Image (cartoon, grey):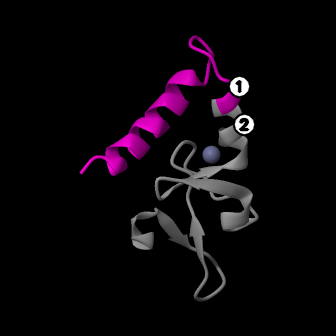
Amino acid sequence: MYRRIQQRQSGQKGILLPVCVVCGETPPKGIAGGILVSRCFICTRCEKEIVRSRVGDSRYSEIKEGLKRIWGYVKP
Ligand SMILES: [Zn+2]
């Protein structure tokens, strides 16, 4: 099931880095720089924004789209 996480090959051979479903970026710390939600990766920065975000915030729609992708993975 692990392979459903979006991954990107890093410069170092054999090391795969997760890609955040919200911002599409890979944190410098890799998997340690975020959390896994329903097998999808969210970086710490986006996680904090999700916690703080409210309807009407400039980044709310972007975060919402990222979360939709997660719920999409969850559905059978
Ligand atoms: Zn992110």
Query: Could you tell me residue 29's position as x and y percent?
Result: 75, 65
Residue in the picture at 72% in, 64% down: 32
**Is the C-beta separation of discs 1 and 2 under 8 Å?**
yes
- Measured in 3D between alpha carbons, the distance from the residue under mark 1 to the one under mark 2, in whole angstroms, is 6 Å
Q: Which mark is residue 11?
A: none
- Tally of numbered discs: 2
SS at badge 2: helix
In the image, is residue 42 above or below residue 57? below
Q: Is residue 11 magenta?
A: no
Query: Could you tell me residue 70's position as x and y percent?
Result: 42, 45
Q: Nearer the viewer, residue 12 or 60?
A: 60
Q: Nearer the viewer, residue 11 or 46?
A: 46
Give the residue at the far top of this rendering: 56
Q: Which residue is mark 2?
A: 48
Q: Which residue is mark 1?
A: 52
Q: Quadrant of residue 36?
A: bottom right
Is 18 left or right of 27, judged from the image as shown? left
Give the residue at the far left of this rendering: 76
Residue in the picture at 63% in, 32% down: 50
Specify few, some or many for label 1: CA neighbours under 10 Å numbering under 14, 14-19, or 20 or more: few
Identify residue type, mark 1.
Answer: Arg
Residue in the picture at 40% in, 36% down: 68
Query: Could you tell me residue 31's position as x and y percent?
Result: 66, 65
Task: Please state the extent of the stretch shown in magenta in the rendering.
Answer: 51-76
Residue in the picture at 61% in, 53% down: 25
